[in-house]
Amino acid sequence: MAGGGLKKGRREQRLPGRAVLDSSGSGQDGTPSAGPLYSIDLPPWAANIGSTRSLQFDGVTSRVFVPDSPLLQLTRSLTIEASFKAEPTQPGTPLGMILTRGDTRPFLDAYSFFLNPGNTITFQIENSNSDSVSLAYTVPFDTWTHAAGTIDDTTGEMKLYVNGVLVNSTNTSMRPFAALDPASSPGLGIGCDGTGQ
């Protein structure tokens, strides 16, 4: 979940220091930082995939960090999915990060999902020259939403789906870059960029 304050009655709980486990079995476990909250507030489809908790982020610095690995270097065909409940961004924050792969260098995030101020979700990819292409769509606040961003390497089709419906698309020759700077805290950030910047 991005942004916003806490909602009463959701039985949030802090679990500092515990790893957030990768349910795919690929071992891409994450480390929580700056106090994301574990909540029983779940999307309706969570039971179908065995989820029992969601994460509430403060929209400023709370996050889960997954160290970079070759499995995250998606440079050809790819699909990135997220289930989230959008809330208004915190005052002074430029956007609400849902997921991004990058490092501490500015404007070099290979792929990302974020909310612009307001409630517009953006799926964006960047190349190593900081050129980017993005797709956006307005989503409701305080409602569970599923979004998927896809790229077909063969055709160049880049698509954004919201709740299973194609809502935006383009054709691009751009692909996300692979190599992050090992000296600049590379990895995947969920809820914020990986270093809380």
Image (cartoon, rainbow, N blue to C red):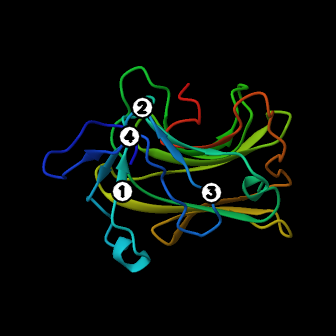
Residue type at mark 1 is Ser
Distance of label 1 from label 4 (alpha carbons): 15 Å
From mark 4 to mark 2, how far is it between C-alphas? 9 Å
Tell me how many marks there are: 4
Q: Earlier in the sequence, mark 4 or mark 3?
A: 4
For disc 2, the marked residue is: 34
| Numbered badge on residue 16 | 4
SS state under label 2:
loop
As drawn, the residue found furthest toward the bottom would be 48
As helix, strand or loop, the secondary structure at mark 1 comes to: strand
Q: Who is closer to the viewer here, 138 or 74?
A: 74
* Spot occupied by residue 49 in the image (x, y as percentages of width and height): 43, 76
Q: Residue at x 63, y 61 (%)?
A: 27
The residue at which mark 3 appears reads as 28
**Mark 1: few, some, or many residues within 10 Å (few <14, many ≥20)?**
some
Q: Is residue 15 above or below residue 49?
A: above
Q: In 3D space, how far apart are the residues under numbered discs 4 and 3 (Cα atoms)? A: 18 Å
Q: Is residue 126 above or below residue 130?
A: below
In the drawing, does residue 173 fall left or right of residue 43?
right
Viewer-nearest of discs 4 and 2: 4
Image quadrant of residue 56?
A: top left
Give yes or no for contact between labels 4 and 3 (Cβ–Cβ under 8 Å).
no
Q: Amino acid at mark 3?
A: Gln
150 horizontally vs 141: left or right = right
> To which quarter of the image does residue 2 belong?
top left
- Which residue in the protein does label 1 denote? 54
Up the image or down, 124 lies above or below 116; here it is below
Q: Compare marks 4 and 2 and give the one earlier in the sequence.
A: 4
- Alpha carbon distance from label 2 to label 3: 20 Å
